[in-house]
Image (tube, helix red, strand yellow):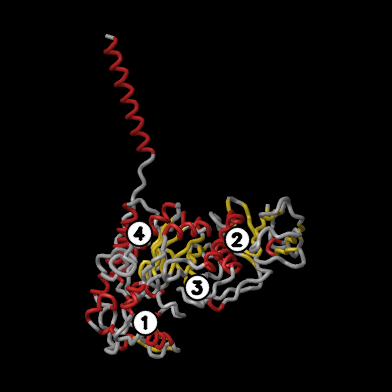
Amino acid sequence: MKRKIVWIVIGTLIFISCNNQKKDEEATPAKAVKHFEPTWESLQQYECPEWFRDAKFGIYTHWGVYSVPETASDWYGTHMYNQTHPNYKYHKETYGDQKEFGYKDLVPLFKAEKFNAEEWADLFVESGARFAGPAGEHADGFSMWDSKVNPWNSVDMGPKRDITAELEKAIRKRGLKYVVSLHHSWLWGWFPTWDETTDCADPANASLYGEKVPKTAWQLEKGNTWYTVNPMPSEAFERVWLEKVKEVVDGYSPDLLWFDNRIQILSEDIRKQMMAYAYNEAAKKEQEFVLTFKRPDFPLGTGTVDLERNRMPKIYPEPWLTDNSISKQKWIWHKDLKCYPTNNLIDDLVDIVSKNGNLLLNVAPHPNGTIPNEQKQRLRDMGKWLKLNGEAIYESRPWLIYGEGPTETKTGHLADMQFDGFGDEDIRFTTRNGQLYAIALGWPESGVLPIKSLSTSKYNGNIKTVELIGHKGKLEHKQTIDALSIQLPDTKPCEHAFVFKIN
């Protein structure tokens, strides 16, 4: 009898437990996984994830076969065949005639003998970056991963290593999000495959240099080689372009997939297929995925907007990205590379974040795989600043206005190459969890910082206390019809932008 009662009790408890579990499941239904169709309407389901909104700062690298010559041209692969460009003469004098020693012959010289993904990842962490990764393939047709569709890759040639895989492992091990950039739409017409005086015209090299295109695919404009598109890319080119993207998505699952411009030369159909594939694969992996693009390659809302050496003039309603280089003029390493001062890099980060953007900073490694000391120091200085002042950057959101001051940033593609930086009167604002931060990009010699946007004539709020991060104690301040005037301490708390907490 006792045994019967025990089993009745156990059965009742199991029934109640299962019933309660069923009710809980009904009360909190599983989140539906989005499915993307290759239509612009369906691709508008894209949502930029919170990790990207919070991260603010990332690093990527321009490093590959094009780094080998160590000369002043980022586009060495194409300029070495252009008789009007200095790289043509340099190549001929250094390596030999372009018909005998072409770009393909630089591949064995790209050995990456000192490349250490662990050291790179440690440096990225030290810099304060929250996402990082390599240029997976630049315009030169050389894949930095174990490609099955492209025999010209870093596993079968050159370094004989899967650079993309090594960096993925090292970067993710340190808790950073992983980035891969792709520039390979530029390969169409990049090399002069029509020119019989070069090795580019040899059909045996077509898997690197691409299909033969007519001379009209090249157009000399203002002393630089630029590309018209005549004819448009072939179906075969588009198929390989798409397969390369799929290899990166399937093999390395980047958290952020970055695309260079000029994708508009591809058919809309192939662009939509690519986005749908990337989004659906990320959804299967329950991955919070970011895809960035330059306008007008994709419709707004189908991904996250990216600007090159450029920035939004004011607060943009959606998160956005700008990519700039550690050097004002160059993306790749060369012997005379000059880096931005650290102050410029930090000011740019602050300005971009105040406008709801993220900064992706390019680093230019040496051909042997090391990151030169001058660049390392810039990154470490940024990390030191972020360690002290990061509460005003990470997880922050824009305020009512992005800032104040006389300096107007230039706008338009590559506009930052003509921008010299901010002055002592420039101030930027951010917020985090209800806290307002005013970030002064200079330290006034007068010892008083005026913030006009917080004057009684512009800001209807009683400012109780003002603090300076890195300085102990509250600061004296006075709010008048003209400005909030803050009395600065005798000693600066850091070397660069100064963060004030307004309460």
2 and 1 marks in contact (CB < 8 Å): no
- In the displayed structure image, the side of residue 351 where residue 483 appears, left or right: right
Q: Nearer the viewer, mark 2 or mark 1?
A: 1
Q: Report crowding for label 1: few under 14, some 14 to 19, many 20 or more residues within 10 A (C-alpha).
A: many
Residue contact between numbered discs 3 and 4, judged by CB atoms under 8 Å: no
- Pointer 4: residues within 10 angstroms few (<14), some, or many (20+)? some
Say whether marks 1 and 3 touch (CB < 8 Å).
no
Q: Secondary structure at mark 2?
A: loop
Instruction: Please indicate, yes or no, whether residue 216 appears anywhere in the rendered image.
Output: yes
Rendering coords of residue 335 (x, y %) = 49, 77
Q: Which residue is mark 4?
A: 165
> Which of these two is toward me, 483 or 99?
99
Find the distance from the CA under tag 4 to the CA under tag 2: 42 Å
Q: Is residue 235 left or right of residue 484?
A: left
Q: Position of residue 64 (x, y in %)?
A: 38, 71
| Residue 163: quadrant of the picture | bottom left
Point 60% across, 64% down: residue:
402
Numbered badge on residue 400: 2
Is residue 408 positioned above or below 460 on the image?
below
**Count of number-bearing discs:** 4
CA separation in Å, label 2 and label 3: 25 Å
Q: In this figure, which residue is indicated by the disc labeled 1?
A: 78
Mark 4 or mark 2, earlier in chain:
4
Measure the alpha-carbon separation of dots 1 and 3: 22 Å
User: Who comes first in sequence, dot 3 or dot 4?
Assistant: 4
Whole-Å distance between the Cαs marked 2 and 1? 46 Å
SS at circle 4: helix
Q: Label 3 belongs to which residue?
A: 309
